[in-house]
Amino acid sequence: MNCLICNTEAQRIKTMGDWVEQDCPACGRFRVSGALFADMKTNRQAFNVEKARSWLDKQRAENRAENQDDHSPLIDSPDSGLVLD
């Protein structure tokens, strides 16, 4: 499967939750909610690669600073500015 953010070949991680999880060599490991994934697919939308990668880096840094579990960041809203119309 290709990365949902940059379209590079990425590994899809099997999950039990309502999200798509991927590990991309360029974008890292991340999750996209099932609802957002379905909406983006239906509306043929894509992520803004630069903004999405920057947002993921920020989320990972905040998680490390707060000593939170190492869960992959979850993108769950089209209103985040990461999705292109």
Image: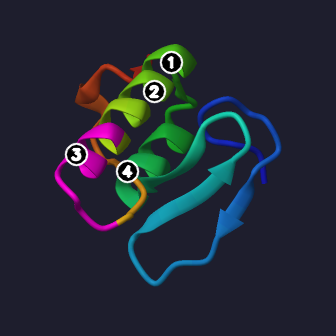
Residue 63 is left or right of residue 40, and the answer is left
Q: CA distance from mark 1 to mark 4?
A: 16 Å
Question: How far is disc 2 from disc 4 in space, using C-alphas?
Answer: 11 Å
Cα distance in 3D space between marks 3 and 1? 26 Å
Q: Name the amino acid type tagged 2.
A: Ala
Q: What amino acid is found at the position of numbered circle 3 in the picture?
A: Ala
Question: Disc 4 designates what residue?
Answer: 73
Q: Identify the secondary structure beneath mark 3.
A: helix
Q: Are marks 1 and 4 in contact (CB under 8 Å)?
A: no
Q: Nearer the viewer, residue 67 or 21?
A: 67
Query: Which one is closest to the eye, mark 1 or mark 4?
Result: 4
Q: Which residues are magenta?
A: 61-69
Would you name the residue on which mark 1 appears?
48
Position in image of residue 18 (x %, y %): 39, 71
Residue density around tag 4, few if under 14, some if 14–19, many if 20 or more, within 10 Å: some
Query: Does 59 sit above or below residue 46?
Result: below
Q: Residue at 60% of width from left, 44% of height from top?
A: 28
Disc 3: which residue: 65
Q: How far across and how far down the image is residue 70, in percent?
A: 38, 64
Q: Label 3: few (<14), some or many (≥20) within 10 Å?
A: few
Residue named by callout 2: 52
